[in-house]
Image (tube, rainbow, N blue to C red):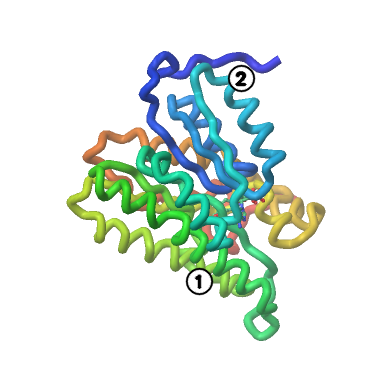
């Protein structure tokens, strides 16, 4: 039986509110648990509502006083995002921390063999989805003069690699958006952090390669990061004093020195 954990601010009805996109697995799910432990109430977004329902039940059981709202939204579906934003303006105005985590890669084809559908879905989710979902939340933060936006970039947003042209381009875009947001928001007391992980063992590689066996090989004989490792970093950035903004954080596993440079114990 899982142990009930009394979060720091469990008796406080004015808990800070964090919205996490892509909270049904991996880094987003781990971040939801970590921020619940930190005393946040949560708004969780993903496409798999059945999974989100389980996540909500487990968080509300484990963290006393943590209120969890869940929404089934495809961040790449502009009409659905706009409808949600219209119906939830009050909620949007209360968000203290936005974790733009929903994202994915599809395929590893070289540019000469690139499939258009793969390219389009990565751009739609990782760039257009992030932007579309964020805009009114960021506007509300700017207007009230407080907030923290955490974007999930990647080491693929700093260095490009063969077979990752479009995924890298989307994460370079996330880094550019993070930098420009920080400049646009200067003076509004809104922090913007770009988290840039290396290899993290989540559902990411299964989604990318379309097959769990192939995904498992990616992490064979090495120790990758876990979703919890990244969640810990996100929590640390959010918990810095308000005048401190961690702008970027590059986090590799010890067994990965650079994109394709991985130490495996054969
Ligand atoms: N794993 C890595 O090695 C790694 C490294 C660097 C950066 N990242 C980045 O970290 C973020 C999280 O990835 P992860 O590793 O945790 O992968 P993951 O386990 O596959 O999780 C991705 C999450 O995003 C959600 N999602 C995907 N498409 C969506 C859409 N169109 N609308 C709403 N939600 C969507 C998924 O939920 P549903 O399927 O339920 O919608 C899931 O909750 C991504 O932005 C990824 O690019 C990952």
Residue 57 vs 11, above or below: the answer is: below
Residue 17 disc label: none
Left-right relation of 254 to 191 = right
Q: Quadrant of residue 93?
A: top left
- Measuring 61% from the left and 73% from the top, which residue is drawn there? 120
Residue 38 vs 176, above or below: the answer is: above
Q: Of the residues under marks 1 and 2, which one precedes in the sequence?
A: 2
Q: How many marks?
A: 2
Say what secondary structure mark 2 lies in. helix
Residue 126 vs 2, above or below: the answer is: below
- Measuring 21% from the left and 54% from the top, which residue is drawn there? 186
Residue 36 in sight in this render: yes
Residue 37, position in %: x, y?
A: 49, 25
Residue 158 in sight in this render: no
Image quarter where the N terminus lies is: top right
* Beta carbon at label 1 within 8 Å of ligand 1: no
Identify the residue at the far front of this view.
Answer: 87
Q: Quadrant of residue 11?
A: top left
Residue 61 disc label: 2
* Mark 1 vs mark 2: in front: 2
What crowding class fits label 2: few (fewer than 14 Cα within 10 Å), some (14-19), or many (20 or more)?
some
Residue 8, position in %: x, y?
A: 42, 18
Q: Which residue is mark 1?
A: 169
- Measuring 69% from the left and 75% from the top, which residue is drawn there? 109
What crowding class fits label 1: few (fewer than 14 Cα within 10 Å), some (14-19), or many (20 or more)?
many
Residue 236, position in %: x, y?
A: 39, 36
Identify the residue at the far left of this view.
Answer: 187
Left-right relation of 200 to 91 = right
Residue 129 vs 99, above or below: the answer is: below
């Amino acid at each position: 039986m899982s142990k009930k954990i009394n979060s720091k601010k469990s008796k406080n009805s004015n808990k800070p509110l964090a919205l996490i996109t892509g909270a049904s697995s991996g880094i987003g799910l781990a971040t939801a648990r970590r921020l619940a432990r930190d005393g946040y109430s949560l708004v969780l977004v993903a496409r798999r509502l059945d999974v989100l329902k389980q996540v909500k039940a487990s968080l509300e059981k484990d963290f006393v006083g943590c209120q969890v709202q869940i929404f089934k939204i495809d961040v790449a579906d502009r009409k659905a995002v706009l409808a949600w934003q219209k119906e939830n303006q009050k909620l949007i105005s209360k968000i203290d921390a936005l974790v733009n985590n929903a994202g994915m890669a599809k395929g590893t084809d070289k540019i000469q063999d690139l499939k258009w559908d793969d390219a389009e879905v990565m751009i739609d989710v990782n760039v257009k989805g992030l932007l579309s979902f964020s805009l009114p939340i960021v506007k509300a933060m700017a207007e009230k003069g407080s907030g923290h936006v955490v974007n999930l970039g990647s080491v693929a947003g700093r260095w490009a690699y063969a077979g990752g042209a479009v995924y890298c381009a989307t994460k370079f875009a996330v880094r550019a958006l993070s930098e420009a947001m920080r400049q646009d928001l200067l003076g509004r007391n809104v922090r913007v952090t770009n988290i840039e992980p290396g290899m993290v063992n989540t559902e990411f590689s299964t989604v990318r390669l379309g097959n769990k066996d192939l995904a498992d090989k990616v992490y064979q004989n090495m120790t990758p990061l876990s979703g919890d490792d990244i969640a810990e970093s996100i929590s640390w950035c959010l918990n810095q004093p308000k005048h401190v903004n961690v702008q970027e954080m590059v986090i590799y596993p010890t067994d990965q020195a650079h994109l394709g440079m991985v130490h495996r114990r054969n």
